[in-house]
Amino acid sequence: MKLDGTNDYYIYEYDALAERVAEVYSEYINILKRDGTPRKDVGFRWFDFKYFTTKDYARLNEWNVLGFTSVSMRDCVKIQGSLPVTF
């Protein structure tokens, strides 16, 4: 996390991310190990940058996918400062 508020996120709907993770795992599990034996199923899944496609990179800060508009951290501070605060 960057303190200057310039953090970037790749935004996915739940089903889209689950589908991409399943695709990556399927490709991985179907490739034989170096000794020619099949890979064993593991109990976890992953999605590293090395598996990103052009479509995945296009999701950078695409908050509109979730129904939000892009808001910078500076805007959040302005908004927070304008709200009434009660304790």
Image (tube, rainbow, N blue to C red):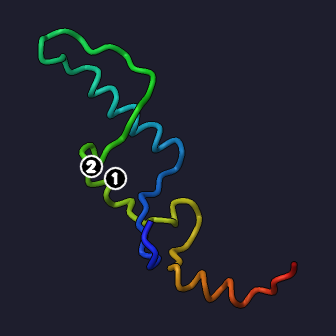
The quadrant holding residue 9 is: bottom left
Q: How far across and down, in percent of the image, does residue 80 sit? A: 68, 83
Query: Vertically, is 48 above or below 79?
Result: above
Name the kind of residue labelled 2 in the image.
Answer: Thr
42 vs 72, left or right, is left
The residue at which mark 1 appears reads as: 56
Q: Are marks 2 and 1 in contact (CB under 8 Å)?
A: yes
10 vs 37, left or right, is right
- Identify the mark at residue 33; answer none if there is no mark: none
**Residue at x-position 47% and y-position 38%:** 18
**Quarter in which the C terminus is drawn:** bottom right
How packed mark 2 is, by other alpha carbons closer than 10 Å (few <14, some 14-19, many 20 or more), is few
Name the kind of residue labelled 1 in the image.
Answer: Asp
Q: How far across and down, in percent of the image, does residue 59 sit? A: 39, 59
The quadrant holding residue 69 is: bottom right
Query: Vertically, is 5 above or below 8?
Result: below
Tally of numbered discs: 2
Label 1 SS: helix
**Quarter in which the N terminus is drawn:** bottom left
Q: How far across and down, in percent of the image, does residue 81 sit? A: 69, 89
The residue at which mark 2 appears reads as: 53
**Residue at x-position 44% and y-position 27%:** 44
Depth check: give the residue in front, 10 or 74: 74
Query: Vertically, is 37 above or below 19?
Result: above
Q: CA distance from mark 2 to mark 1?
A: 5 Å
Query: Vertically, is 67 above or below 87?
Result: above
How packed mark 1 is, by other alpha carbons closer than 10 Å (few <14, some 14-19, many 20 or more), is some
The quadrant holding residue 60 is: bottom left
Label 2 SS: loop
